[in-house]
Amino acid sequence: MARDKGHLTDLQLRHWIKAGKPLAKADGDGLTFTLSAAGVAGWILRYRHGGRRRELTIGRYPDIGLAEARGIATLKRAEVQQGRNPAAEKQKAKATAARDWTVRDLAKDYRAKKLVSLAHSTQVSYGRHLKRVEKKLGALSVREIEASDVVALIEGAGLTWGESNMLLITTKCLFTHACGKRLINANPCHGIMLSALLGERPPRRQRLMLTREELKLLLAAPMRRRNGLAIRILLATAVRSAELYQAKWADVDLDGAQWHIPKSKTGAAMDIPLAPVVVDWLRELRTLAGNSAYVLPAHSRSRAARHGGDTHLNKDTLREAIDHWLRAAKPAVRRFTPHDLRSTVKSHLRALGVPRDISEMCLNHKLSGVEGIYDRHTYFEERREALGKWAAVLSALTSSHPARPS
């Protein structure tokens, strides 16, 4: 490249900037000073590579002065002579820097683009474990994360086997998102086996059936009235605890003695027939609920305030109420969870002679095999009869040992 005549001077540059007219002035060997209509001054290096004319933006003036711009241009011209393309390399470096996210950046993007599309319960579970990932790995670059980092995360969390498994699943989903964005080429979670870190998964706890004697003690348990009524309704209807604590009065028809449960990831939409005693329990809850839209409104005013003034009971409240009663009263009742009430109802329905398929439908379980595919009947009246028989048993157990409200 032959050097052009008429090198620029700082005096000229300041004069042009003061004049404020757009221009482009060559300094020689492709280095050009530019001034935009908006008054932005800068340096461009023009050169040829691969038979085509190219441009490389060096930077703004006066951040990069005349002498410095000439020095940079000299280095870049040397790269061109070596067969390299400075403009393409700069663009590639810029793209690489844009992809050099931290794990915290990745988690933020995952929450905004993926987590929001998942079921609410999944959002809660994944969100809990994403916080653990951010606390341990958040400041690291996504591209730096290795399998050993994930192993250290899991081993250091000190969680149960089941929660550790959810942490691994969450972390794997997070880095699958990174692969999808081409931030990394391989998921660092692949190949990690929880059994190798924590041993084989402990046997799953077997669901139990509370006996009639145990139920009699439970129905007489001295606990908060709303909690006691909620447990009775769970026993009488066999619904999932989440379906009850999230229920709204808009879905409960007390005059028609039925309760509509909307579709969720755990089951299809379903209408639950309500026995007369269950309607009475719900009417009492209706009075206790006041102006709340929820069948079981939050006990805590602060919790309600955090959710706009009205929300449902905390998901752990009924379990904690049961645990407190078992610890404090030490009744002759085996330890159980709200979910065990469903297996209790299922077992007692069968003992009452209710056919298997009807008892399965009472729990909103799908029928298996071809029957489940083609049988669209809801068995509403059959379920009403079955749950009516069971409610009569509960009423007898309740009246023989009345509960004490508190």
Image (cartoon, rainbow, N blue to C red):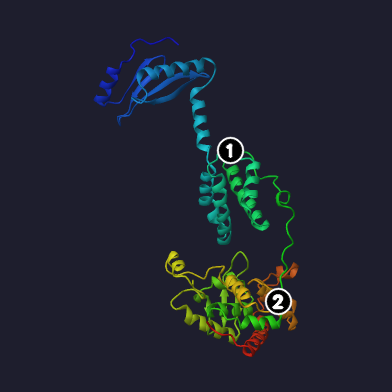
Residue at 44 percent across and 15 percent down: it is: 74
What amino acid type is highlighted by mark number 1?
Arg
The total of numbered circles placed on residues is 2
Residue 359 at x, y = what percent? 70, 77
Please state, as top left, top right, bottom left or bottom right, where the N terminus lies in the image. Answer: top left
Q: What residue is rendered at 66% in x and 54% in y?
A: 165
Residue 62, image x, y percentages: 33, 25
Residue 215, horizontal then vertical, whole percent: 67, 81
Element type where label 1 sits in the image: helix
Classed neighbour count for the residue bearing mark 2: other residues with Cα under 10 Å, few (<14), some (14–19), many (≥20): many
Q: Amino acid at mark 2?
A: Lys
Q: Which mark is residue 346?
A: 2
Disc 2 or 1, which lies upstream in sequence? Answer: 1
User: In the rendered image, is residue 381 in sight?
Assistant: no
| Cβ–Cβ under 8 Å for marks 2 and 1 | no
Horizontal arrangement in the rendering, residue 97 relative to residue 268 (left or right): left
346 or 272: which is nearer to us?
346
Q: Residue at x 59, y 66 (%)?
A: 264
Distance (Cα) linking label 2 and label 1:
51 Å
Q: Is residue 109 visible?
A: yes
Numbered tag placed on residue 143 in the rendering: 1
Spot occupied by residue 99 in the image (x, y as percentages of width and height):
53, 37
Residue in the foreground of this view, choosing between 35 and 132: 132
Q: Is residue 319 above or below residue 77?
A: below
Which secondary structure, mark 2? helix
Lateral position of residue 335 relative to residue 41, left or right: right
Q: Which mark is residue 266?
A: none
Give the crowd class for mark 1: few <14, some 14-19, many >=20 residues within 10 Å: some
In the image, residue 297 above or below residue 105:
below
Tell me if residue 299 comes above or below residue 75 in the rendering. below
